[in-house]
Structure formats: C-alpha cells, structure tokens
Amino acid sequence: MSEPTNEQAAQPAGGQDGRPMVQMRDIIKKFGTTTVLDGIDLDVHEGEVVTLIGPSGAGKSTLLRCVNGLERITSGTIEVDGEQLSYSEKSLNRLRARIGMVFQAFNLFPHMTVMDNVTVAQREVLGRSREEARSRGAELLERVGLGHKADAYPDNLSGGQQQRVAIARAVAMDPAVMLFDEPTSALDPELVGEVLDVMRQLADDGMTMMVVTHEMRFARKAADRVILLADGGIAEQGPPEQVLDSPASERGQAFLQQLNEG
C-alpha cells in the first residue's frame, strides 16, 4: 500500500479556510548522524487544532521544539504567523512572543504565587502594567477553574492544577499559536481529564493548536486533523475518524494495532 508523499502530507485534509499560521517546508533535523525529521512539509491553519501522534522516537516533540526555535533545524524553512524563523536573538524573541508552549513538566516558579506566575511575563515581555496583567491573569485563572488559587504557591497545588496554571500563563501572552508537548503525561490518571477539558475549551474558542499527545480521546474529540509521524516523516494524516478508525497506510495500521493491543 502506497504511503502519502510529502506534497500530499502538507495539505490539510478536507481543506481549511484559515490562513496558514505555521508553515514548514522540507524540514530536516539531525542529531549527529541520526536523522529525526526527514523532509517534513506541513501547514497548520489559523484556528486549526492538529494533534501529532506516533511511536516513541518518531520526532513529535522535536518537531514542536523546532517550531519555536528550541531546536535548530538542519535544513528547510519554518514560518510562524507570516514570519520566517531565523536564529538571531531578536528574531527568536519576537517569534516566542507569538507562541505559547506547554511542556510535560509544569515549569512554574515555585517561589512565586499562582498570580505572579501568570503575570510576570506579561509585564516583562509585553510591557503590561501590573493592573493590566493582574486583570488578564484573574480572567484566565477563572477560566481554568483556579481563580480561588491566585495567592497559592505551586507546591500547594495538584499536578493537574499546576498544568492548568501553566496553560493560563501561556494563554495570557495572547499567542498566535499554542504548542502542547504531552501536557498530561506527568499527571496521575484521575487528573488528566481536567487538563484536557481546558484544552478543549481553547479549541472551541478557535485557538490554533499543535498538540503532541498519547490521549486518543482528546485527538478524537478536539482535533481537526490527526497527523501520524513515523520513521522521520508524515505517515498519514486526516480527520480523526479516518486516521484513528480506518488508517490507509500500513504504518498507521501497525501503530493503531499496537495501541489497541496495549
């Protein structure tokens, strides 16, 4: 059975009306002699939610880190919100001001209150006044169900609560696109749902999102498009029901069979 070409892989299944928010062309990323990403072509459109799935070592997290410049690509081009990525300090700072990223680890400042965690970057990067930043922070903490925890410290929160604070902190920067790298993998199973609910709210609000996840229920319910990465490339992509229920590629069939057996 034939695999999709990179040209085919760059095109969103079913078409998207929004403008391309993230454009990647012929992305190659090597670590030494090991090629992790091998000619990735991908567009993510404004308001689109794309989930990246695939076996361990497929390059999912590396791809996200390339988008915001945490990893330097070996070759190819990346554009975010119409600006091509380069690696000067000025360019990276401008890029990262347009991208929110939520990692597996919560990365909150333990010596700061929840409110201070959500407001410090607003003040220092966006130049908002303390009052403006606190107003935006209070709005977002209420939105993620943690308005009553504004004066608490991270150590007094559950893992799920800390991750929700991390999401609120990222959204407070008014990003053009949100990147999520396995945001629930460090959580106890009973806490996963509360984080996925917040992410679904963001998706419903039209946030452009790229999400590396092993949570197939989130991919099925929230994603516009599911992309299966394998062997350094895009093995398959399409609507969730297509990729998760009836994968066309042999690689997709093998991955889903492995998931079902697990």
Image (spheres, grey):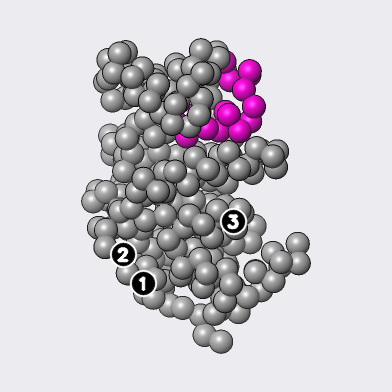
**Circle 3: residue type:** Arg
Kindly check if marks 1 and 3 are in contact, taking CB atoms under 8 A apart as contact. no
Q: CA distance from mark 1 to mark 2?
A: 7 Å
Per the rendered image, the range of residues in magenta is 153-168
Image position, residue 116 (x, y; %): 44, 16
Marks 1 and 2: CB-CB under 8 Å? yes
Q: Which mark is residue 16?
A: 2
**Which mark, residue 45?**
none
> Could one spot residue 176 in this view of the protein?
yes
Q: Nearer the viewer, residue 110 or 192?
A: 192
Give, as a three-letter code, the residue at label 2.
Answer: Gln
As drawn, the label of residue 14 is 1
Alpha carbons under labels 2 and 3: distance apart:
22 Å
224 left or right, relative to 17: right
Q: Nearer the viewer, residue 213 or 33?
A: 213
Is residue 255 depicted above or below 220 in this figure? Answer: below
Which quadrant holds residue 14? Answer: bottom left
Q: Which residue has dot 3 on it?
A: 217
Reply yes or no: does residue 11 show up in magenta. no
